[in-house]
Amino acid sequence: MLEALIAVAVFIILLLLGVPVALSIIGGAIVGLFAVGSLPMEGLAQQSFSPVGDYSILAIPFFILTADLLFSGKLGAQVIGLATRVVGRLRGGVGMTSVLTNAVFAGISGSAVADATGIGKVVIPWTKRLGYSGGYATAVNASASSLGVILPPSIPMILFASASGASVAAVFTAGIGPGVLTAILLLIGCWLVAWKAGFPRVKAKFTLKRLLIDLLFATPAILIPIILIRVVLFTGIATVTEVSVLAVLYALGVRVLLYRDITMKQFKKALVESASASAVVLLLIMFSSALAWLLTIQEAPQALAEALTSALQADWMVILAMLLILLVVGMFLDISPAILLLTPVMLPVANAIGMDMIHFGIIMIVTLAMGLYTPPVGTTLFISASIGKVPILETARALLPFYGLGLLVVFAVAFAPGLLFIV
C-alpha cells in the first residue's frame, strides 16, 4: 500500500511541476514499481500496450477524424444557421444556439475539446458582435461543449467501457438521458442569464422557407447520431468500431458528393490533425493503464472501498464522498486520464454499495465533465477564453450559474438514475 501512495505522490508532484500528464503518470508508475522492488519493469510495458489492443479503442481515432472532416467544411455553418432559426430570436438565443449546435456535434465528435474549438471559433466572435459580453460568450461555449462527452458517442464513455469491461452500447444508451437534461438546463440558463443582464435579441428575419432550407442542409450532421449511433449501434448491426469507420465514410461522402467543398489538401490536414489528437489520447490510455495496474496489485482500490464503507455507514454518504473526489480530481486532471486512473480505483467502492456499473460510469463522466470548465485546469474554459480573448477569471465568474446547473445534473444522475433511464 505504501508503494501505491508513493506512486500517486510522485504523479501529483510531477503534475504540479508542469510535466505533461502522460509523462507524470508513467513517472509515478516507474517510481512506484522501483519501490515495490519485487516486480519486473517489463510489467509496465506489457500493461501499457495491453489496453490499446482492445478492438473498441480503434473507434477513438475514427470518431476524431469524423469531427475533423465535418468541422472544416460548410456543415458547421449550416448547423449553426439552423439553431439560430430555431432559438435565435429568444432572449439569450445566441447562447442557446451554441448549446443546440454543441448538442448536434456531440453526436459526431465525442470530444468536448473538438466541440469547444470548432464551434467556439464561429460562435464566440459572433456572440460578441451582437452585443453580448465576452464573459457570457465564452462561458456558454465552455459549458455547452461538455455535451461532447456526455452525449453519445463519447470518447470518455469508450474509455470507461474499456477500463471497466462494460458494454459500450449500454454506456452510450445510459448517457442519452443525462445529456438531454444537461442541454435543457443549459438552454434555461442561457435565457435566465441573458434576461437578467438585458442582453439583446437577434433580429433575424424568420421564414418557414429559410428554416426548411437550413434544416435540409443541416440534416447530414443530424443523421450521424440518429442513424449511425442510435440505430446501427444500439440494434447490434455493427460494433462501435465499425460504426466509427462508417461515420468517417459518411462524413467524407457528404463533403465530396453533397457539399463539394473538400480538397486533397484539406483531407490530408484532417488526417494529420486527427492522428495527432488520437496519439495524445492513446498515450494517456497506455500510461494510465500501467499506473492503474500498479495500484491494483497493491490493493489500493480495495483499501479505499473498505475505508469509505466503514467510515460512512449510509450508501448516500458514500456516493457524496465519491462525488467530492471526482469533482476535486476533475478540477486538476483532464477527463480521459481521470477516467482511466479512477475507474479501477473507485469501481470496487461502487460495487461495495451495490451500485450498477453503468450507473457508476455515467456518474464519473457527468461529474468529471464539470472539470472541463472549472479552474484551475479546465480545458474548455481555457480554449473558450483564448478564442474570445477574455480573461480566465471573467469567464469563470460568468460560469457561476452554469456550475450550479452542472451540479443539478450530477445530483440527478447520482440519486435519481431511474428518472434519466440510466438503470
Image (cartoon, rainbow, N blue to C red):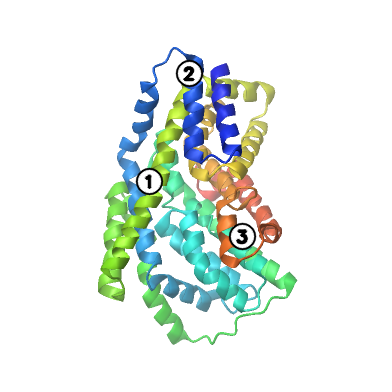
User: Which residue is nearer to you in this view: 381 or 232?
Assistant: 381
Location of residue 138 by image quarter: bottom right
Residue labelled with disc 3: 185
Residue labelled with disc 1: 279
Residue shown at the point (68%, 57%) measured from the top left: 396
Location of residue 190 by image quarter: bottom right
Marked residue nearer the N-terminal end (1 or 3): 3
Q: CA distance from mark 1 to mark 2?
A: 27 Å
Labels 1 and 2 touching (C-beta < 8 A) = no
Q: Residues within 10 Å of mark 3 (few under 14, many from 20)?
A: some
Residue 132 x/y as whole percent? 65, 74
Residue 379 x/y as whole percent? 55, 52
Res 34 label: 2
Labels 2 and 3 touching (C-beta < 8 A) = no
Q: Can residue 387 be seen here? A: yes
Front of the two marks 1 and 2: 2
Q: Residues within 10 Å of mark 1 (few under 14, many from 20)?
A: few
Please state which amino acid type lies under the numbered disc 3.
Leu
Element class at badge 3: helix
Residue 135 x/y as whole percent? 66, 65
In the rendered image of this protein, does residue 128 appear above or below residue 298? below
Marked residue nearer the N-terminal end (2 or 3): 2
Front of the two marks 2 and 3: 2
Location of residue 312 by image quarter: top right
Residue 291 x/y as whole percent? 47, 28
Element class at badge 2: helix
> Considering the image in quadrants, where does the N terminus appear?
top right
Marked residue nearer the N-terminal end (1 or 2): 2
Please state which amino acid type lies under the numbered disc 2.
Phe
